[in-house]
Image (cartoon, rainbow, N blue to C red):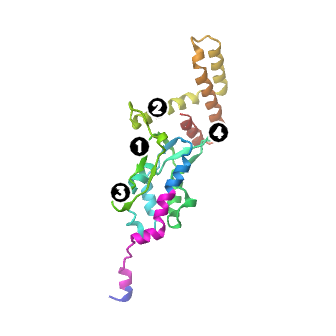
């Protein structure tokens, strides 16, 4: 075997020391801090339909390090929670996990690719957690990607599970989407006037809800992007 053959057959083993040098501990802490800032004020969270996020993560890490970052706990975290977003009043999504500007350079390509995938996806549900910690922070000597929810954002229902609450929200979104698609500002104003006229029995009880719906319709109709329109209805749900 020639020296060249020996060099070709040599496989570099990426170590825990390399992980520290690459900034993995900083990545873990950056995600936690960014998430905490992103949900400040108990902003609603939403699940997107992004797929294969962990595969995107690994494929954008240097090849020699991929085996080191192949981890079932991190796979679970990234695929389950990496697609979480908030939505602003104009229907624009924001990733609450991936912040390209603040992560170590080694992980920037992976984080940027995941963030792009998330923001190109669609919202499919409101997210309601049933525990504060999302992910598995530590197993043995290994530290994994994880975040902690504010306690105020965790489900406190003793009657329904978080999954049941999220299912109800999806149904609410479906109803709101159907109703808003057939109403305009003018029809909502007429409905409010009818409720005020006492023609409808105890119609005054429904006036606050009718006024809320009117504002939703006006705002949703003012948004031009179709995905943002849909997102806004998720926010209003």
Residue position for label 1: 131
Of circles 1 and 3, the one toward us is 1
Q: Which residue is mark 4?
A: 223
**Disc 3 secondary structure class:** helix
> Eyeballing the image, is 129 above or below 51?
above
Picture coordinates of residue 3 (x, y %)?
37, 88
- Distance CA(mark 1)–CA(mark 3): 20 Å
Which residue in the structure is indicated by mark 3?
72
Q: Separation of disc 2 and disc 1 at Cα?
A: 23 Å
First-in-chain label (2 vs 1): 1
Whether residues under marks 4 and 3 lie with C-beta atoms below 8 angstroms apart, the answer is no
Q: CA distance from mark 4 to mark 1?
A: 35 Å
* Residue at the extreme bottom: 2
Q: Nearer the viewer, mark 4 or mark 3?
A: 3
Q: Is residue 96 above or below residue 211?
A: below
Q: CA distance from mark 2 to mark 4?
A: 23 Å
Q: Earlier in the sequence, mark 4 or mark 3?
A: 3
Disc number at residue 67? none
Residue 3 falls within the magenta-colored stretch: no
Mark 2 crowd level (few <14, some 14–19, many ≥20, 10 Å Cα) = some
* Residue tagged 2: 171
């Amino acid at each position: 075997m020639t020296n060249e053959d020996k060099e070709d057959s040599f496989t570099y083993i990426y170590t825990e020391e390399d992980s520290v040098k690459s900034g993995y501990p900083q990545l873990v802490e950056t995600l936690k801090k960014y998430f905490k800032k992103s949900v400040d004020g108990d902003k609603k969270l939403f699940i997107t339909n992004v797929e294969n996020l962990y595969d995107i993560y690994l494929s954008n890490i240097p090849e020699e390090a991929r085996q080191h970052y192949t981890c079932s706990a991190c796979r679970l975290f990234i695929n389950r929670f990496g697609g979480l977003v908030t939505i602003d009043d104009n229907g624009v999504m924001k990733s609450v996990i991936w912040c390209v500007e603040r992560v170590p350079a080694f992980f920037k390509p992976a984080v940027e690719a995941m963030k792009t995938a998330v923001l190109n996806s669609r919202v499919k549900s409101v997210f309601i957690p049933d525990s504060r910690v999302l992910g598995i922070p530590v197993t043995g000597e290994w530290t994994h990607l994880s975040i902690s929810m504010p306690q105020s954002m965790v489900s406190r229902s003793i009657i329904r599970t978080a999954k049941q609450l999220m299912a109800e929200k999806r149904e609410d979104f479906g109803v709101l989407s159907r109703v808003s698609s057939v109403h305009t500002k003018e029809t909502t104003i007429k409905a409010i006037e009818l409720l005020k006229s006492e023609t409808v029995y105890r119609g005054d009880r429904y006036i606050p809800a009718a006024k809320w719906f009117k504002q939703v319709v006006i705002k949703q109709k003012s948004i031009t992007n179709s995905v943002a329109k849909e997102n806004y209805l998720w926010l209003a749900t």
